[in-house]
Image (cartoon, grey):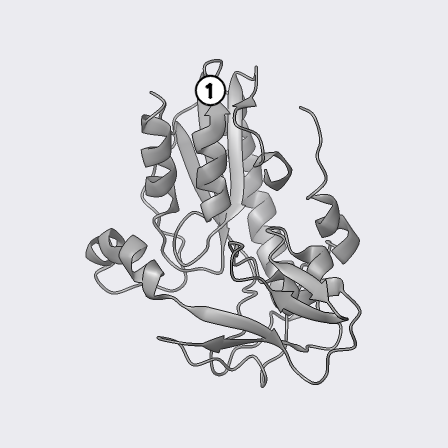
Amino acid sequence: MVSLLNRDIIKTGAETIGFIFPIHLAMAPAPVIEFVKKMDLKSAEYIFAIATRAGSQHRAFIDLENALKKKGKTLDSFFSLNMPSNDPKFEGWKPATEDEIKKMESDIQNKLNSIQKIILNKEKSREEDTDFITPMPAFSILSIFLPFLNRLYNVEFYADSKCIQCGTCEKVCLSRKVKMIDGKPVWQKNVQCFFCHGCLNYCPQQAVQIKSTRLLKSFTDKNERYSHPYATADEIAGEKEYEDV
């Protein structure tokens, strides 16, 4: 998706279209919604979405549905998959253990087998979410205000004295917000952050930190990190490369 966001119109001739993305702040990531807004969906007959999350409730499918409705389309099916958290800014956060990851992978594979059948048969599946691990009190009401609360979510990334100027943070930054200047990483204020936490979790020295300017106290300097076990920094960097579709 990221490699195509510079287009005015994103065209496809596919009849079945799926959107697969992680949950950000209990919502669909901004680049996903921007991608949908730019898509030509005339050929789409069946649209599904799969959201990965750390286990919390979310409103991502509402966000996606709202964007699709403006194009005269709707979500036929949607599914949530629980995966390890990569958000180490809270007190007591720990990365998933190998055993926890194996258990999640087993559960996900079982669920994917069911999802595959639904998609191949173009069935509708819009069931209420019951697989969340972390419930949010009064979520149906809270979800209405999430887009406004998101504006208050103001954090800053920076590199501490452990930085070895390797440039990994710039390499994995999908929004191109991180830029190496005079050998040091700078998070450019005029570039939107996608909040993927790639720079935070892929730094080999754990030098990248988060500090909160409003709501959240950050514990990244005390906590460990989690990066996807099957995705390298080079592979993530490759997602920024332009490819024709």
Name which quarter of the figure residue 128 lies in: top left
Task: Answer with left or right where residue 173 lies relative to residue 22.
Answer: right
Percent x, y for residue 152?
33, 65
Task: From this view, report whether residue 52 is shown above or below residue 155.
Answer: above
Position of the C terminus, as image quadrant, is top right
Task: Answer with left or right where residue 133 lies relative to residue 224.
Answer: left
Percent x, y for residue 125?
39, 32
Local secondary structure at mark 1: loop
Residue to which mark 1 is pinned: 41
Does the image show residue 232?
no
Task: From this view, report whether residue 52 is shown above or below residue 244.
Answer: below
Give whichever of 170, 103 is nearer the camera: 170
Percent x, y for residue 76?
39, 27
Does the image show residue 189?
yes
Q: Image point 57% across, 48% down: which residue?
A: 108
Q: Image point 49% across, 13% down: which residue?
A: 43
Q: Residues within 10 Å of mark 1 (few under 14, many from 20)?
A: many
Q: Image point 40% across, 53% down: which residue?
A: 131
Looking at the rendered structure, the kind of residue marked 1 is Leu
